[in-house]
Structures are given as C-alpha cells and as structure tokens.
Amino acid sequence: MIRLGHQGLQALNEQRVTLPVPEPLRGHLHRIRAGEARLADVLSEVDELIEALKAAPRQMRIPPVYLEYEQALISIYREHWDETWRPIGLE
C-alpha cells in the first residue's frame, strides 16, 4: 500500500513512475516488509499518503506525440467516413 501511494504521488506530480523503486524508499519498503517498522508508524505513513494523494494535482499532461497520433487517427477515421457513408434512400 505504501509503495503504491508513493508511486501514485510520483505519477501525479511527475507524470512518470520510476522502476525499480529508488532508494531510500526501496530500503524503507524492505524494512516494512521484514517487520522492522512499528505498525503505528506504518499506519501513520498510510494516512499521510492518503492526504497527499487527495491534495495532489489531478491534471495529467498529455504528451504532444500522443496528440499527433490521436489527430492522425481522427483524420483517417473522417476520411473513411466520408468515403463510405451514404444516406439511406439517396443512392
């Protein structure tokens, strides 16, 4: 849960997710998994991550390459539509 929270914040703030998880977070997650962290500290961190995720910006940027691809698809679709669509009864 903590790893996903941190990666979710990174995705919202930086529009990317680093894999594998970089240090020092990676070591921190290993200590939690090994049971070396106190439950109260882990739950507190979860609460902090939830609040940070609620406050994070939600507007994701769309890369220009994707926009060009999307515009090309729309153009191809419209050309196909114009060539193949025929109103019923007007043939």
Image (tube, grey):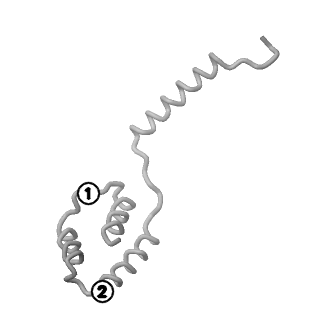
Q: Residues within 10 Å of mark 2 (few under 14, many from 20)?
A: few
| Relative image position of residue 66 (x, y in whole percent) | 42, 39
Q: Nearer the viewer, mark 2 or mark 1?
A: 2
Q: Residues within 10 Å of mark 1 (few under 14, many from 20)?
A: few
Q: Is residue 20 above or below residue 38?
A: above
Question: Residue at position x 30%, y 57% from top?
Answer: 17
Q: Amino acid at mark 2?
A: Leu
Looking at the rendering, which quadrant does residue 40 occupy? bottom left
Viewer-proximal residue among 61 and 86: 86
Residue furthest to the front in view is 34
Residue picked out by circle 2: 39
Residue picked out by circle 1: 18
Question: Residue at position x 23%, y 77% from top?
Answer: 32
Q: Amino acid at mark 1?
A: Thr
Label 2's element? Answer: helix
| Relative image position of residue 51 (x, y in whole percent) | 43, 76
Viewer-proximal residue among 88 and 54: 88
Question: Residue at position x 39%, y 61% from top?
Answer: 12
Q: Is residue 31 above or below residue 16?
A: below
Separation (CA) of disc 2 from disc 1 = 26 Å
- Tag 2 and tag 1, C-beta contact below 8 Å: no
| Relative image position of residue 46 (x, y in whole percent) | 36, 78
| Relative image position of residue 7 (x, y in whole percent) | 33, 63
Q: Please tell me which of labels 2 and 1 falls first in the chain.
A: 1
